[in-house]
Amino acid sequence: MFDNLSEKLDKALHILKGHGQITEINVAETTKEIRRALLDADVNYRIAKEFTNRVKEKAIGQNVLSTLKPGQLMVKIVKDELTELMGGDAEGINLSGNPTVILMSGLQGSGKTTFSGKLAQFLKTKKSKNPLLVACDVYRPAAIDQLHVVGEQIGVPVYSDKENSDPVALAQAGVAHARANGNNVVIIDTAGRLAVDQQMMDEISRIRDAVSPQEVLFVVDSMTGQDAVNTAKAFNDVLDFDGVVLTKLDGDTRGGAAISIKSVVDKPIKFIGTGEKMDAMDVFHPARMADRILGMGDVISLVERAQEQFDEEQARKIQKKIAKNQFGFDDFLSQIHQIKKMGSMKDLVGMIPGAGKALKGLDIDDDAFKHIEAIIYSMTPQERSTPDLLDARRKKRIAKGSGTSVQEVNQLLKQFKQMSKMMKMMQGGGGKKMMQMMQQMKP
């Protein structure tokens, strides 16, 4: 995520490292490189220039605090300005109304239908809502079918009527269906076009006027860069939408849309899509995104994801097993599954401060645990619960069954024993302190 921009900003800020004082000369050189990095990321020239002018004004003449070096001070200034440029504070979604009506808008291919499903799952699992998805793309039957597939995947009902070719009437019927069936949130998936046209704008305006949504969200593909910002402006001029959704941030995006869009349309980015899976979305936090762009990671989001998967009862059971030397491969497997539920490995690594830079160029596969799982699944239940049973004959059978080598089986056993030993050591004061910290972090 924003790897190229992060690298160029790091080089720009490196200019001040080693200097004992901020001067007009070294600040001018640094801000020039920052502006160049932003322009390469497809940030609008006017926005990039205004941004670097503000950074320059704040940096020049400042006395370096005793605890900060000039380079560190400049990083803080850039981070604060980036945060402000992207919106300042995170914006929530308006869930007033009974039912709450959320209207999705955007071009074809922006990811509206997939994100409609992601939002429905988010509201269902994290906000305890009972959502209904409404299919209003009357031009592409495949879009209706796709929404039904998405709805089935996440266990959310979908309202559609292929006999009805009036999207306004469909939207109204969907809201009425929600009222009659106790759905307290209605997410309306509308048609898109390959480009902005008057017919599309008129149609979505009529839907908005007919159902009076609490939220109008504009969904845009972040990989389209400055084009995304221009499209957002065209939609906002007609719809006056409430917020932006940036999809495909896990792709090779340059970052221009995320950085520029708030400044151009004066509407907050509310959500980001970070992958294909239905749980691959996040509330947009400008400060956290600024941290990630500057290579400082996003520990808060990482902890929040861990908390979502943290099962206190299971943790207590594992603690007891560790204390009694009964921690086996089935327990290890359950821990792997919890990590996998937290999101893509590349995204998780990007949240660890410094890890993205340290692992630059490495292909971090989401199937990183695949061969480990294959080895464990090739064991008998008795072997999983009692790893000491694994002799040479058993290891050879497991390697053959898992499509791996005996060397890989031995390596996994060695890592497992080291981890078990470390967890056993943590059962004392260290383990208790860690558990207390996790409890305090839970909301």
Image (cartoon, grey):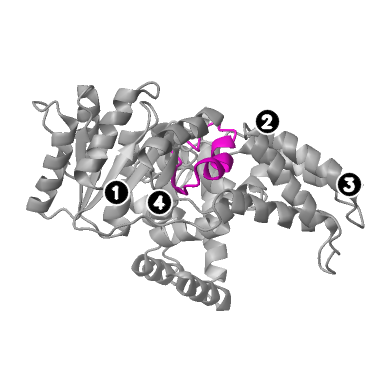
Q: Give the numbered dot on residue 121.
A: 1
Q: Is residue 418 visible?
A: no
Name the mark nearer the viewer: 1 or 3: 3
Tag 2: Cα neighbours inside 10 Å, few (<14), some, or many (≥20)? some
Magenta residues? 248-275
| Magenta span includes 213 | no
- The residue wearing badge 4 is 333
SS assignment at label 3: helix
Amino acid on which disc 2 is placed: Asp
| Magenta span includes 272 | yes
Q: Residue furthest bottom?
A: 429
Residue toward you, 400 or 313: 313
- The residue wearing badge 3 is 26
Q: Of label 1 and label 3, which has the lower sequence position? A: 3
Q: Give the numbered dot on residue 40.
A: 2
Mark 3–mark 4 Cα distance, whole angstroms, equals 53 Å
Mark 4–mark 2 Cα distance, whole angstroms, equals 43 Å
SS assignment at label 1: helix
At x 79% / y 50%, what residue is drawn?
A: 56
Tag 1: Cα neighbours inside 10 Å, few (<14), some, or many (≥20)? many
Q: Of label 3 and label 2, which has the lower sequence position? A: 3
Quadrant occupied by the N terminus: top right
Mark 1–mark 4 Cα distance, whole angstroms, equals 26 Å
Query: In this image, 406 relative to 362: left or right?
Result: left
Tag 3: Cα neighbours inside 10 Å, few (<14), some, or many (≥20)? some
- On screen, residue 106 above or below 197: below
Q: Of label 4 and label 2, which has the lower sequence position? A: 2
